[in-house]
Amino acid sequence: MPGNTELAISEIKAYALREPVSRRGYTVVEVQTKGGLAGYGECAAAAPEALALARQAAVGQAATSYEVIGRQLAANPGMQAAVGMALLDVVGKFTKAPVFQVLGGPTRNKARALTPLDGASDAELMAAMKRAREAGHRAFLVPAPTSVAPNQGQAFVKATRSRLEKLRAEAGTDIDFVLDGGGRLTPGDSASLAAELERFHLLWFDEPCRVSNLAALHKIASETVTPLGFGRRVHQSGAFQDLLREQVIDVLRPSLALNGLSQLRRMAALAEPYYTAIAPHHEGGPIATAAALHLAASLPNFFIQQVPFTEAAEDRAMRAKLGGALEKPVDGFLTLPTGPGLGIVVDRGVLV
Amino acid sequence: MKRRQFFSGAAGAVLTGRSVSAGVSCGCALAPPPQNPLGADAFRGVGSRLKITSMKVFGVSLTPDSDRPFVFVKLETDGGVIGWGEGTLEGKAGAVMACMQDFRDFVIGSDPMQVEHHWQSMYVQSFYRAGPVMGSAISGIDQAMWDIRGKVLGLPVYQLLGGPFDGRGVRGYYHVDGQNRDQLQKLRGTALQMGVSCFKTGIPGYYEWIETSRNIDRAVKSMQMVREALGPDIDVAVDFHAKTSPSVASVIVKEVEPLNLLFVEEPCPPENVKAMARIARRSTTPIATGERLIASYGTRELIEMGVVDILQTDINHVGGITGLWKVAACADASGISMAPHACEGPIGGLATIHVDGAMPNFLVQEICSGVVAGPKEKVWEEWLGFPAMRMVNGRFPLSQKPGLGFELTEEALKKYPFGGTKPMARVFHRDGSVAEW
């Protein structure tokens, strides 16, 4: 087979990294081939057993067999995700094409970005929004106020509404918001909040409660037109099948670190005949950001990509060494990487 | 017809570069002003530099009266790379050929690498969605773009898709071509010798809304005979071809449970999912359908209602490689297997093998041929230089060449000029009313 040797996987390594200031941690997975190509992927953390399984599944196989290898790692979602990204990086480098082109794109020429605002109080969130706007962001994930007790009723609803109204008053009309419930609210609080905020026109209400009880989700979805996002902890695409069939989801929010490109593409394919989009969750490192941009540019039903907002100069420097300058939005949109593979040049000095 | 005349007057005609003889417009006030006219400019800098320079559509009739002339499409690029695809639609060749031509403005001048974008553009921006004619036209163009993509990227399409799951090839089945027990037993011998592990047969006759005991027995006995003669170690599938109503199918399918069929195909027509569900829930026999369903939109309800065990999506109708891959991905999430349909020409057949090879939920691949190659298969070999869609040890081999893995010349097709569209065979009940086969 042409290129067989070049594509044959010879080694897989994992590097647990931590940003110096934010202390954000993620693991970079490196795949090497006999032909000297290297590909990179990322997940939250990699257990030694998962790495051993990945080696067992992949070494000696062609990087093009990314679906086959991924399937064998299904019980280890993070490793499956990271290896999958790395294999597509290799395939792209071998074909001298960006990954989005290998996957049938581009379907768009830039990708809309969403970034979380960090802060405990309204004042902190306002300040965070100012900084993120200056950095080019135009859409923000806003945490719901910390709940003091379940079923908090009107006080909680009012506090949330007040938080959002302050942000919008400050931001004007060209800024959009996603309310982040963090999966922490009760279905009752979620439903009240979603109904109360209908006319605020959130982009959507994200992960209001846990995805554990379809009947509870039905209650929220049937009482409101506020779009609902779910799925940051979902790994099985069948779970999205249920949420779509039951008409309780407006935005699929699967995590990049948990699913990687292959699984996310499958989830997006599931959502397409429901006229529903995917907006991947991502709070890890810059290699997954690169992978996310390729995904965005290969899917028809991509809406927005969550990216971390990194403020400390030391953290930014570290991310730049891994992923270049991909996390700088221009007027709310990220630029697509157009180099071969994931389009990033990893400074191996960071991988220790 | 200049719809936007209604909005913008004479300036519109200048902008779109087409002249309008008089100021009369067909007048859709909702029509937007033209934007990024043939697609390409929006992707400058992120797309490839390759451009499609021509699209040629071929109707190919192996015999002048063929009811399913092959519809092939060839795309040429400014880089010299060419791609072939197929959109054969039984009984509607002329319509598909015309529909492909209708897509000319979507195709010429565009970047063949961004196949997903063009798929969306053809499907969504046609306004009238889906349908077998448009689905088949998109299928052909999509396959041709994938052929180009593979050639440009230097990999067989199944490798671009992340496969192969089985390097030995993809398991296939032929159609039963025996009429009686002796012929079927001989077929068993041939199959075992050739390593073929699966066959499909049909059910005799045509069926009315409700059937007589005699006709039900005849159907059951014919299936029993095939099952017994082929033996327990060869899988048998039965195509009802939607000849039966849900009521009649339910009775027959119940009777054949002890035969452990691989699947029963199209026990009723495919538009009404709940009707098919009624058959499925009253039997343990796996139910398969899907060859007439277009895009992943077409199979959504079947999948979410858990009606079928197996989908038989056809790469020449569903929307090509892109469409088939998506249906398989949706099916996989619900534990549904894929047994793609193939009853047309060799290009779609070869294309479907690539997608099969990259499916985790692949079961078996059809080819509408017998265990012994006939005249049709000889022509295919003459065109392509190898025995296309013939199994080796029960499997269709995977190509090692980039793209779809074959070469075809326009010259080779000239011996079989388009004989025009011919209807599929029509059958009638004893009282002259319309029957299905």
Image (spheres, rainbow, N blue to C red):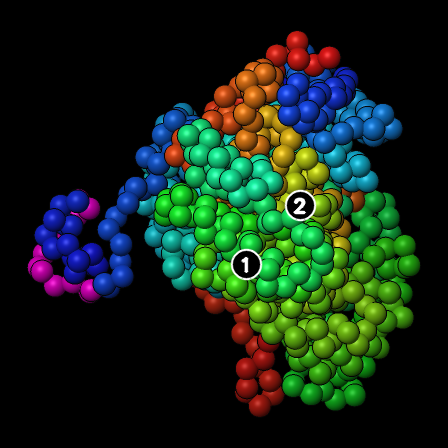
**Residue positioned 9% across, 60% down in the render:** B23
Q: Amino acid at mark 1?
A: Lys
**Residue positioned 63% across, 64% down in the render:** A153
Q: Is residue A309 magenta?
A: no
Task: Specify the principal SS of the magenta part.
Answer: loop
**Residue positioned 55% across, 54% down in the render:** A160
Q: CA distance from mark 1 to mark 2?
A: 26 Å
Q: Position of residue A105 (x, y in %)?
A: 49, 36
Q: Is residue B397 visible?
A: no
Q: Amino acid at mark 2?
A: Arg
| Observer-nearest of B429 and B296 | B296
Task: State the mark number for residue A158.
Answer: 1
**Residue positioned 36% across, 47% down in the render:** A173
Task: State the mark number for residue A232.
Answer: 2
Looking at the rendering, the stretch of residues picked out in magenta corresponds to: B16-27
Side of B348 relative to B241 (left or right): left
The secondary element bearing badge 1 is classed as helix
| Observer-nearest of B106 and A100 | A100
N-terminal label among 1 and 2: 1
Query: How crowded is the residue under tag 1: few (<14 C-alpha within 10 Å), some, or many (20+)?
Result: few
Q: Position of residue A190 (x, y in %)?
A: 63, 60
**Residue situated furthest top in the rendering:** A349
Mark 1 vs mark 2: in front? 1
| Image: A88 above or below A301 | above
| Image: B375 above or below A56 | below
Side of B322 relative to B306 (left or right): left
Q: Is residue B18 magenta?
A: yes
The chain carrying label 1 is A
CB contact under 8 Å: marks 1 and 2: no
Q: Position of residue A241 (x, y in %)?
A: 67, 57
Side of A192 relative to B279 (left or right): left
